[in-house]
Image (tube, helix red, strand yellow):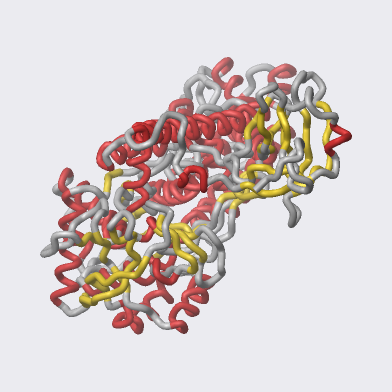
Amino acid sequence: MLVTCALPYANGSIHLGHILEHIQADIWVRYQRMRGNNVYMVCADDTHGTPIMIKAKQLHMTPEEMITKIGEEHRKSFAGFLISYDNFYTTHSPENRELSERLFLTLKEKGYIKERTISQLYDEKEKMFLPDRFVKGTCPHCHAEGQYGDNCENCGATYSPSDLINPISVVSGTTPVEKQTTHYFFDLPQFGASLHEWVKTALPVEMVNKIEEWFEQGLQMWDITRDSPYFGFKIPGTDDKFFYVWLDAPVGYLGSFKNFCSKHPEVNFEDFVKADSPYEMYHFIGKDILYFHSLFWPAMLEGAGLRRPTKLFIHGYVTVNGSKMSKSRGTFIKADTFLRHFPAETLRYYYAAKMNNKIDDIDFNLDDFVKRVNADIVNKLVNLAARSSGFLTKSFDGMLSERLPDTSLYQKFADARESIGSLIDSREYSRAVREIMELADEANRYVDETAPWVEAKQNGATPHLQEICTQALNMFRALMTFLKPVLPEVATNAEKFLNTELTWDSVAEPLLNHKINQYKALFTRIDKKATEAMIEDSKADLKAQQAQTASAEGKDSKKNDEKKKESAPDGIISFDDFAKVSLRTAKVLSCEVVDGSDKLLRFSLDFGNGDVRNVFSGIKEFYKPEDLVGRIVIAVANLAPRKMRFGVSESMILAACGEDGKVRLVFPDQGSAEGMTVR
């Protein structure tokens, strides 16, 4: 089997939403390997496209420098979560370039690539065609604002930048115009019939129903070209045309595998990718990229004479405490931040306990996370070994007995391997975990009822004591084997303790007349306080990111200021800068003295249409609060909120300082405070 996960984009850190997919795939792959299947698991960073260019420019780095740095961070994050990749690579590679060109040229030769002259958005100020992510506007389908020019993050629709309502150039902030350019298109409609049949075998039923809507709407020709400037692969035979990132990104699955094969000559790459390949290929992806993987990708492969995926395994999103992940609330948790506070296997287990083969979203509830990990892994699983192993090492030199006192009970555990294995194979992890924990409850009831500590105290080192402890450890061994794909590190340590390898088939027979090693703690209890610290760390991550961005913007601003000095006297700003300030009238709903401050008054300003803001102003010595309530003032409406000692100020009131040193507000309802006309 060849198994892949969606390629993480190389413009940011891995977070807990990403990790869900990679954990889901890794559990499945580890199980397949335990059952004797030969599995190659590969992935890569998705490194091309406009967002990479934008982010690299912000960081004052080249795109190559940035994707190298982020690639190292991604590898570390996945290794930290024990994701067992055979190869983690990059789409910015010679293998990926070669395969992308191979697909394109084959498709073109077979007549599946069409050349068209189209109208594309063009930034007249910057003299450049605008790639998808250089344009923002209102989605033409759901009318969500602030969407990029390729697809809507709100409704998932795909479209061309010119379809956007009220498009704006991200580069200059101006309204782009349409200008003609020549692009290449992939003739997706030619594959409609074959795709319609393929999705019925490759996708879950609920997803087939969703895709049926796309077929009913009619498949469209797919623009696979982007104009310069663009970070990616240049299209063969052109000077300024590049492959759209979504063409070479899925090819990155094969590029990573080809790179792996080059280092393992016993694995034949062409045998895996040929149309009649006897092998299997599975993609684990999120529901947000279904369109590309269920239509464009298999159609390109078919058209190029290569094999299509065997199946697509699709999952939902991750929420935290019932809400969308939020940077301001500290619930947008990066993988590395989580690992500073908790072992990776705590999240692996928690995700497994909630995952199924549907596209349901998963909620990472912090309180439930702590309770479940402690109750299941600590109290039910490893405690089972801790409660019984000590008697064996102390009184029987670590030897297990030659028989079990309750063979029918152990047989129940042995028989469960088929049902549990079937559930893991079908990615019904939550049901598998539930069944495992029900067995753990039975094992712990057995220990409670046989009470080896009572037997040892009353009768000493009897054969019965050895047997009931052997029974308990064999049930632990079975449970640990079932959870090995979920808790690989705990399982490795359990193997050292039990002095035997945990294999799926070995559960069929109990481990008897065998010497174990001294037990060492396999897992430690986690604390709720650590979740609170993790949230605070996530908030700190956001501040650090903002500081980095501000630093980069500061460098740009300094350069701009130096340019302006060449044409403007000191202290003079341009009209363009002044035009950025939005001045609006606002009514003073309330005004009060701020306790602990010698200068500040706290205002509640009503800007109209329900827009009420909290504002601080240092005019306490010039005005009495009660005299300002009900008055109309002028305030800056587009000023970023500023955190102050006494709270957050969300605007700034317009005022002026006279030659006498007094500060005066501007009251548009009756001219200025001095009776002068305000124009």
Q: Indicate the quadrant where residue 87 lies.
A: top left
Q: Indicate the quadrant where residue 311 lies.
A: bottom left
Which sits in the foreground, 236 or 290? 236
Residue 41 in the figure: left or right of residue 348: left
The image position of residue 387, as x and y in percent, is 64, 26
Tell which residue pokes out farthest to the right in this image: 626
Q: Indicate the quadrant where residue 556 lies.
A: top left
Tell which residue pokes out farthest to the front in this image: 676
The image position of residue 160, as x and y in percent, is 39, 69
Q: Can residue 76 be seen by looking at this rendering?
A: no
Residue 213 in the figure: left or right of residue 52: right
Look at the picture and state if 674 lies above or below 516. below
Which sits in the foreground, 376 or 362? 362
Q: Can residue 390 be seen by looking at this rendering?
A: yes
Which sits in the foreground, 524 or 300? 300
Look at the picture and state if 289 lies above or below 432. below
Tell which residue pokes out farthest to the left in this image: 237
Residue 350 in the figure: left or right of residue 444: left
Q: Residue at position x 19%, y 67% from top? A: 104
Q: How many tags in the picture? A: 0
Look at the picture and state if 16 lies above or below 432. above
Q: Residue at position x 33%, y 52% from top? A: 50
The N terminus, quarter of image: bottom left
The image position of residue 455, as x and y in percent, is 71, 23
The image position of residue 465, as x and y in percent, is 64, 25
